[in-house]
Amino acid sequence: MYRLLRNPLYIYLLGFSLSFLVYFLDWSELYPEISTSMIVFFSITFFCFGAFGFVISHLKLIQKTYSNTKSKQIVVFATALLFFYLIEFIIEGDIPLISKLLGRDGVHYMEFGVPLLHGILISFNSFLIAHTFSTYLSTKNKQLLKVYFVLYIPALLFFSRSILMLGLLTSVFIYIHYSKKLKLKNQIKLVALGVIALYLFGVLGNLRSGGDYIYDQSKATQEFMESSIPKEFYWTYLYVASPLANFQNTVNHKQNVEKDFVGFIFYENLPQIISKNLGGPLNIPQKDLVRLIPWLTVGTTYAKSISYLGWLGPYLLFLFNLLVYLAILMFMVPTRSNYHITTLSILSVIILLNIFANMLVVTGISFQLAYCVIFAFFERKKIVLRT
């Protein structure tokens, strides 16, 4: 079972299986019943991801390739990254964390940074965290461990939860690739830590938003509210199951829509760095999923595509995403590359987070794969100057 987690395509099965299991706890009366069309769709995607996952493993395209990237090279890139962040802080004239601590108005974290540049920096920051950790586990160079932790500092300074979350999740998958076997006692410890983390997630949620309001608005069932289950775990149920609920709700309301192939391709298949900046000037309307309640905002990777093409949208998006994953695994980054495990781990995180939204179009996430492909392409090539 532990070895299966090294295959990114199997992560799809794991992620959506957990999402369905949580959904069927039925702790909320708000969530609609899963339809036959949803079951058929996910059965097809499960079969395809499972089958191609088996092929990828059979072709031995997943290897324990140690990263031997020179530490000096990583330090140079980390220094350059921090330099560009410094320019952003100077331009903004503010550090959001310091402003928050001092209780003064400052630049909101959603508005921080130079447009376009900031998106590139965030994506490269996440990529560099992943590859630095991979190279550290390979070489045990303690200097790289220091660089690894330093790379989280900008995220703390301007409240980038995405860098923190992606960095930690990717690090977990990298650790899985490098470790030989996880002992039973360590597995128990990890499960215990996971349960504690989920409980604390609920505690923070109640502190920030107020438990009674959330339970009322999301229509928590009377059976759950009267049960002995700690109410803090309801937050995990809400976040993990709501994407499927919104997807089903969108299916219920958007099956028969006027097809918009241009909008589908533009907003569901191209990076947001393109669609956000060119969608308006090109007058391409953007459509959305149908939310059960406004603050439950996500609907898996597939929900929005329903609004453009009906059921044709999710099927086309599923095929496109699968082809992208297979192209990266089979052709883009060789198994002998220093970036092989980094690529596998980033891809695993992207596929796992597809239970929430279409991560391939999120620039800060998908561009990490682009860096893997670019660096893998140039790592074994020498530049020769001819006179």
Image (cartoon, grey):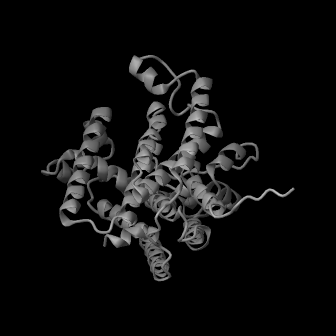
Residue at 42%, 53% (x, y): give it. 136
**Residue 215 higher or lower than 367, as above or below:** above
Q: Is residue 155 visible?
A: yes
The furthest residue to the left:
228
Q: Is residue 294 visible?
A: no
Residue at 53%, 57% (x, y): give it. 69
Quarter the N terminus occupies: bottom left
**Which one is in front, 19 or 291?**
19
**Residue 211 higher or lower than 221, as above or below:** above
**Which one is in front, 82 or 226?**
82
**Which one is in front, 285 or 93?**
93
Q: Position of residue 383 (x, y in %)?
A: 73, 58
Residue 355 sits in which quadrant? bottom left
Q: Is residue 35 left or right of residue 80?
A: left
Q: Position of residue 98 (x, y in %)?
A: 44, 22
Residue at 50%, 25% (x, y): give it. 95
